[in-house]
Amino acid sequence: MYKFIDRAIDDLKQNPTCGIKIPKKMWPKVYVQKYRITNLWKYDLPNAWRLIYTVESDKVKIMSIILEWFDHKGYEKRFKY
């Protein structure tokens, strides 16, 4: 799994929006309350694992912030599918 997450980080460094944008109505409340997110993205990893991240920026830099990664079952539980 380390190799896949490392590759995801490299991809996010090249393009912070390379994942799939998650519509606001689907955001888990825990992310909004705990991290005060303004956007949410999903990056698909092999074997149905998911990496969830948000993108923050200022006038100088753009930064991808990884919030969680989990298998598909954990993803379904977090997003209440």
Image (cartoon, rainbow, N blue to C red):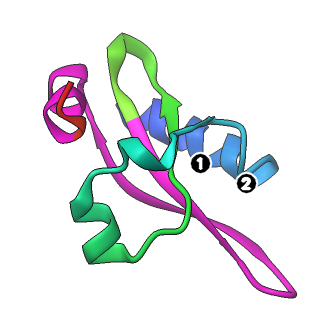
61 in relation to 48, above or below: below
User: Which numbered dot is residue 13?
Assistant: 2
Q: Residue at x 38, y 31 (%)?
A: 50
1 in relation to 51, above or below: above
Q: How far from the left and from the top, in percent, is residue 29?
A: 24, 60
- Residue in the foreground of this view, choosing between 43 and 6: 43
* Disc 1 crowd, CA 10 A, few/some/many (<14, 14-19, 20+): some
Q: Residue at x 80, y 78 (%)?
A: 61
Q: Are marks 2 and 1 in contact (CB under 8 Å)?
A: yes
Residue kind at label 2, given as amino acid type: Lys
Q: Which residues are magenta?
A: 51-78
48 in relation to 61, above or below: above
Q: Residue at x 25, y 21 (%)?
A: 72
Q: Residue at x 68, y 48 (%)?
A: 12
Q: How far from the left and from the top, in percent, is residue 18?
A: 71, 38
Residue lying at the far right of the rendered structure: 59
Q: Is residue 64 left or right of residue 33?
A: right
- Disc 2 from disc 1: Cα separation: 6 Å
Q: How far from the left and from the top, in percent, is residue 16?
A: 72, 52
Residue 7 occupies quadrant: top right
Callout 1 secondary element: helix
Q: How many marks?
A: 2
Q: What residue does disc 1 label?
A: 9
User: Which numbered dot is residue 58?
Assistant: none
The question of residue 52 being in magenta is answered with: yes
27 in relation to 57, above or below: above
